Image: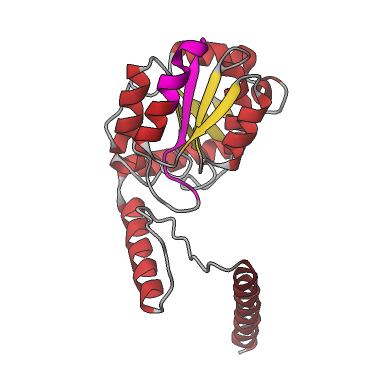
Amino acid sequence: MVYQSGFNCNAGTIQAVVGKGDLIVSDELNHASIIDGSRLSRADKTIYKHSDMDSLEEVLRTNRDKYKNILVITDGVFSMDGDVANLPGIVELAEKFEAMTYVDDAHGSGVLGENGRGTVDHFNMHGRIDFSIGTLSKAIGVIGGYVAGSDTMKEWLSHRGRPILFSTSLPPAAVGAIIEAFKILNETTEYTDKLWSNAKFFKEKLGKLGFNTGHSQTPITPVIIGDESKTMEFSRKLMERVFSLRELYSRQFQCAQEE
């Protein structure tokens, strides 16, 4: 099912598949769209410690008998730190406690797995994830988002996914560009290989300059400053540098045109 954005996927799907009498179990570092989508539902909500399977198991064991349905939600790749979810561990526990699984793979699509098929493919968890969400605006480079799952899921969301029912679909030009992007990804690993090469280069250079890039396992590269005021100053200095370089290149371009 295709939505107008990745954010809309979470805002529109979560509230459609769980409600009063259900429980959402969410990783504490999940994306803001998951948090907002959970708030829109009438289900109860709780969190487990980040990528902590003992914490998740305790939450599931404590709550399994209290709710009709339990939905375990995680990012595939976490958007701030760049680490990868422990999908095998999550799925094992979800199956043990008869809970549904929901993976937001916005930052894994086009990056992990064969030809960028994502985190589910990376861990070979096909057929064991109930809801797999991805964006069409990052690696795919256009706009929109998608939810992949069963035929039953598709039929259900066609009647209950509010952004699908009450908003405009993607324009044909965007759909054409999306199809072409997937075609390119299927035909070659050139672009995903280049992405990983660029990320490795970037991380290495930042490390040599003394920056803390955390424990990222993916091209997402956090630069951890630590102090809030220093972080804002760092951001301001970067923007000043960007505008300075832009002005320099503009002058050089004008000189080249005049010559």
Asked where in the image residue 10 lies, by quadrant, the reply is top right
Looking at this rendering, what residue extends furthest in the right direction?
166
Q: Where residue 256 appears, x then y in whole percent?
A: 59, 86
Write the residue at 60% across / 35% down: 35
Q: Where residue 152 appears, x then y in whole percent?
A: 48, 10
Q: How many marks?
A: 0
Query: In the rendered image of this protein, does residue 182 appear above or below residue 202?
Result: above
Left or right? Give the position of 108 relative to 34: left
Whether residue 70 appears in magenta in the rendering, the answer is yes
Asked if one can make out residue 130 in the rendered structure from this viewpoint, the answer is no
Write the residue at 54% across / 29% down: 46
Q: Where residue 114 appears, x then y in whole percent?
A: 28, 40
Query: In the rendered image of this protein, does residue 254 appear above or below residue 242?
Result: below
Write the residue at 52% across / 39% down: 135
Write the residue at 43% across / 15% down: 150
Name the residue nearer the viewer: 184 or 9.
9
Report the magenta residues as a range. 59-79
